[in-house]
Amino acid sequence: MEPSFSFQEMFPTGPDTTAYRLLTADHVATAAFEKTPVIKVDRAGVVLLAETAFREVSHLLRPSHLKQTAAILTDPESSANDRYVALEMIKNAVVASGYVFPICQDTGTATVMGKKGQQVWTGFSDEAALSEGIFNAYRKLNLRYSQVAPLTLYDEANTKTNLPAQIDLYAVEGDAYRFLFIAKGGGSANKTFLFQKTKAVLNSEALLAFLKTEIAHLGTAACPPYHLAVVIGGTSAEAVLKTVKLASAGYLDTLPDKGSPSGHAFRDRDLEKELFKISRGLNLGAQFGGKYLCHDVKVIRMPRHGASCPVGMGLSCSADRNLKAKITKEGIFVEQLETDPAQYLPTPQAKESDAVRLDLDRPLSEVRNDLSRLAVGTRLLLNGPVIVARDIAHARVKEMLDAGKPLPSYMTDYMILYAGPAKTPEGYPSGSLGPTTSARMDPYVTAFQPHGGALVTLGKGNRSQAVIDACKTNGGFYLGTIGGVAAILGKECITGIEVIDFPELGMEAVQRVTVKDFPAFLITDDKGNDFFKNLAAG
Ligand code: SF4
């Protein structure tokens, strides 16, 4: 029989059960056009919505995310390190909810998806109004400007506003304007992958083997526990990756559980369970060994061209900053996030296991001697001065080295912490400050260590074999700290901060920071041992 036309939505999600709060009943009016009711929204309302959305997601988390984090504390199968990380994350959420220190120092690329009902009228550039709200949030609050504009092919400058944002607007039926706001950190975004596979992957054995390998490759650099999303199929490469982002933000949770000949996306809950089990078996845990690499796994199956089978993978990190909002004739509403994360703290609080205190206020050779006596995996509390430097500062120092100049003394005399703090709130020594992904600095470790630089580094995630080898050859060490707890680190573990080189780089300037009881683990030692390699080997 010839098919007759019938429109099929790609994402037939169920009813929206999100808990919203009324932001304001202002800025919205009703009218009629050719007897059809229309909702008129004024520009100030859209600006206010975007500003509020990025204020909320920078400081508050969803109750469901916090519940999952709290569940790690009471799971008898979670590792001691899983519980340690989870407890720090809840404490971090408590600090962040005070609206002074953002949840993470990387306050992200501002991302907005809007679906505008055709009965909603604005009469201005929605994209410009949303951008203005984002500008206001990042300029007024203690957030970080992470966006760099290209000046030439190779030269860049920070925009100092965190603009541009990524804004995608769609026209739909109806009398509501619905939004999803996401603050997406760089480390989290970097764990988004597209694999151009073929039909050959569409059987249980091949698919599971492939996905197991790729989930293991994710590693811990994006601050687990993750909300992991896997999308199989898709009408194009970009459609797959957009779906990955929406799925990781929980936006597609209510898709049907089964496909149909009409061609729509659905959730495969059986594969979700299998991948979740695989993630637990990898032993990576919530950053330092255990079973909580993931809070959950969402698998979306999409229609595809018969000659292509794209597979997408991505995640929402432990700074799970997603917020829905809507404008209706009743007003402007935002998703209700958790304003009281302290309720998820255990009482009495779990006793932390013993940690070795490491005094950094002495020659680095003495610090290295102490580290050399410890086993990888040892938990440390760091006290004293460290140097904060990341991508651009490292590139500049490398240029100096290439030009035959010596390394600056801060590269040889101190532990190097890979980080870029958020803005400093008034009355505090530092803003939110947490580690950035260490692997990006791998080439500099191998270049600097033979010259006596970067002999002790501190960041997050695993390092390459080249770094492990360099540490063995040069007597170096790599320490890992907890990613995703920058509010508590900035507020409670930093007592002083001063810019000492490249001030024009803003958050990427070289800074001398004094730390107090700053938590870390010894990951790579001077004998070729590596904590993450040991975990992978089981
Ligand atoms: S929690 Fe980690 S991965 Fe997420 S934005 Fe912050 S630094 Fe990046």
Image (spheres, grey):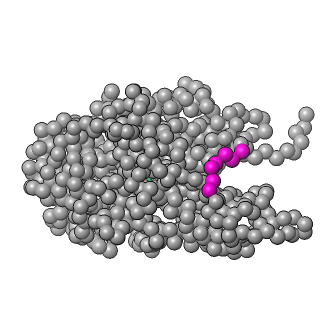
User: Can residue 468 be seen in this snapshot?
Assistant: no
Q: Residue 414: image x %, image y %?
A: 17, 57
User: Can residue 480 be seen in this snapshot?
Assistant: yes
Q: Relative to 253, does residue 97 appear above or below in the rendering?
A: below
Is 220 positioned to the left or the right of 23 in the image?
Answer: left
Q: Quadrant of the N terminus?
A: top right
Residue segment shown in magenta = 15-21
Q: Quadrant of the C terminus?
A: top left
Residue at 16% in and 47% down: 358
Q: Residue 107: image x %, image y %?
A: 44, 60
Q: Nearer the viewer, residue 263 or 254?
A: 254
Q: Residue 18: image x %, image y %?
A: 64, 48
Residue at 53% in and 37% down: 297
Q: Relative to 386, does residue 309 appear above or below in the rendering?
A: above
Residue at 44% in and 42% down: 344
Q: Residue 83: image x %, image y %?
A: 36, 36
Is 394 positioned to the left or the right of 183 in the image?
Answer: left
Q: Nearer the viewer, residue 284 or 69?
A: 69
Q: Nearer the viewer, residue 198 or 354?
A: 354
Residue at 21% in and 44% down: 380
